[in-house]
Amino acid sequence: MRHLVAVGSGKGGVGKSTLTMHLANTLRARGLRMAILDADFNGPSQARMAGVQGAPFIPGRQKVALPRTTNGIGVFSMGSVIPESEALEFESAAHGDSQTWRATREFALLGEILASFEWGVLDLLMFDLPPGAERTVQYADFLGPRTSFLLVTIPSQVSRGVVARSVAALSKGPNRVLGYVDNMTGYYCRDCDAIKPLFDASESSRLEIPCLGPVPFDPDLARRCDQGMPFAELPDTPVRRAIDHVAQQLLDTLS
């Protein structure tokens, strides 16, 4: 694998998983060999967006083959194994639920997934991380210094504050922070082909890392993600151009 990139935030509800899929599809359309590991075991969304819900994991000669999207992105997601009406449960060795024990079991499972599946020759493996600033640092420790981080926020002071904590925590370790994406910076109106404001721009503040670009919200993109339809099929829109720009910035930063 040439590059490992973990997409995190610290804040939930900022569109991190959707952005991961959009970027993967954009880079795949440029010819890169891509895979996504959905590390949010109890909130897996990549299986639905990739169209691989219920896809079987087929054993090969040595390792298990990954399900693939229609355009060839390998995807591991618990959403392919566990129905959305169920949650992943770990038996606790302690009396009551132990957060430390649960995290230990999650990372043991993640290690098994990385070792058991055939990832193939990849240009980029993207990890879709669960929310929580402390989880971001835990994943940095587990994945090691070779993994770079891309953070996602939205233009609100609450989101900026949480993501800033992730930036501060990651700055104490060896992992490279590539920058952040300002997601949902506006609302794309297809009828008027214009970006409408969602947040008060005057209330926004920049994080102390590079911004790879703003990405507006597109309801049609959200609908296509719900239906597992690849981003590459979309017509040219300001939102698609914004994602193309972020994808190019990501490649430039990695090179």
Image (cartoon, rainbow, N blue to C red):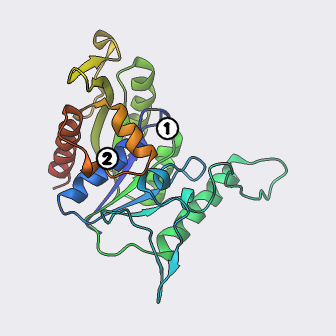
Which residue type carries mark 2? Answer: His
Q: Is residue 197 left or right of residue 163?
A: left
Residue annotated with mark 2: 22
- The residue at 82%/47% (across/down) is 96
Q: CA distance from mark 2 to mark 1?
A: 23 Å
Q: How far across and how far down the image is residue 163, in percent?
A: 41, 31
Outermost front residue: 191
Q: How far across and how far down the image is residue 124, in percent?
A: 29, 61
**Front in this rendered view, residue 239 or 172:** 239
Label 2 crowding class (10 Å Cα cut-off): few <14, some 14-19, many 20+? many
**Front in this rendered view, residue 188 or 245:** 188
Tell how many labels. 2
- The residue at 67%/48% (across/down) is 85
Outermost right residue: 95
- Residue at disc 2, secondary structure: helix
**Quadrant holding the C terminus:** bottom left
Q: How far across and how far down the image is residue 92, in percent?
A: 77, 56
Location of residue 202 with respect to 236 vertically, above or below = above
Q: How far across and how far down the image is residue 138, in percent?
A: 51, 50
